[in-house]
Amino acid sequence: MITQVKAGPGQTTAMATALNRNQAVPDECSPATTSAALRRLLAVHDIYGPAGKRILLRAGLQPGMRVADFGCGIGTVTRTLAEIVGPTGSVIGVDADASQLVQAGDICGPGLTNISFVEADACATGLPRRSFDLVYCRFLLSHLADRSACLREMYEVLKPGGLIVVEDGDVASATSVPPSVLDAFALLFTLLGRKRGLDYSAANNLCQMVRAAGFFKAQIEMHQPAVSSGEGRFLLKWSVEDAGPALISAGLITPDQLESILAKMQAATEDPSVLILAPRMSIVWARKS
């Protein structure tokens, strides 16, 4: 049964304050309130999902485990987690955006009976302490002003000896071969992050962050998907398109410049001679002592 609940009484004000401080949602992971945004987030999962699943299994995800998916968004990984832990396990998806949780319920569907969702700040979830076998997040930490607060929360809800698996990308590493206007993605989002006081390349220090949060036996894998075909080729262009209003508001680009860049990005995406490299992903897994 898929359920959706909010954080408990007394947490609402604190949650809103923490959200305003820590969780300004960047446009490349903006709420999937439109079909275009949903299409983009599904493309993200198509690109990064296979490697993420492989590492989850390598890290030790097993049937029967109790799992918390921090910043679950539209629930693509939540569904994968639920399928792996099976009916004897359970998964709680946590997200501060109610509209994404609605989408998550649709994506996870009625066939899975081991999923629930909680609307809460990832830095103050209200989840029971020392209760989960594995905690997980993807494309969350680089979107927070206080990443260590989220990692502390993940540590606190884990059982002793529990597992953490975190994935995050370095947006500045996205590029194309040969170089093309698609490289504007990396520049624009790097600048937008600075305007927001965020580091969209924080993934480069992901292993150190996990260790600093108190986890041990940390391991890391880095990979950069090359997208030669399929809808995933449009990820960079779709991301800039969806972020357009924010980029204009931040003074990084004019409406006319945005229109021109998007037209050129469309042409480059449709050019089969251009190889598109999505942001490099770092995946870290470790244990709580």
Image (tube, rainbow, N blue to C red):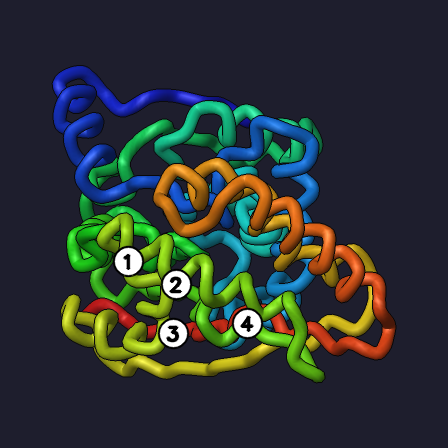
Residue 131: where, in percent of width, then height? Answer: 27, 47
Q: Residues within 10 Å of mark 4 (few under 14, many from 20)?
A: many
Which of discs 1 and 4 lies nearer the camera? The answer is: 1
What distance separates the C-alpha of mark 3 from that of mark 1?
24 Å
Which three-letter amino acid code belongs to the residue tagged 3?
Val
Residue 276: where, in percent of width, then height? Answer: 69, 73
Viewer-proximal residue, 111 or 143?
143
What distance separates the C-alpha of mark 3 from that of mark 4?
20 Å
In the displayed structure, 94 sits above or below 53; it is above
Q: Which residue is mark 3?
A: 284
Q: Which mark is residue 244?
A: none
Q: Which residue is mark 2?
A: 190
Q: The C terminus is located in which quarter?
A: bottom left
Q: Secondary structure at mark 1?
A: helix
Residue 32: where, in percent of width, then height? Answer: 57, 33
Which three-letter amino acid code belongs to the residue tagged 1?
Arg
Q: Which residue is mark 4?
A: 174
Q: Considering only order in the chain, which callout, 1 or 3, is on the residue closer to the N terminus?
A: 1
Which of discs 3 and 4 lies nearer the camera? The answer is: 4
What distance separates the C-alpha of mark 2 from that of mark 1?
6 Å
Q: Which residue is mark 1?
A: 194
Pointers 2 and 1 in contact (CB under 8 A)? yes
Q: Residue at x 77, y 76 (%)?
A: 274
Viewer-proximal residue, 170 or 136?
170
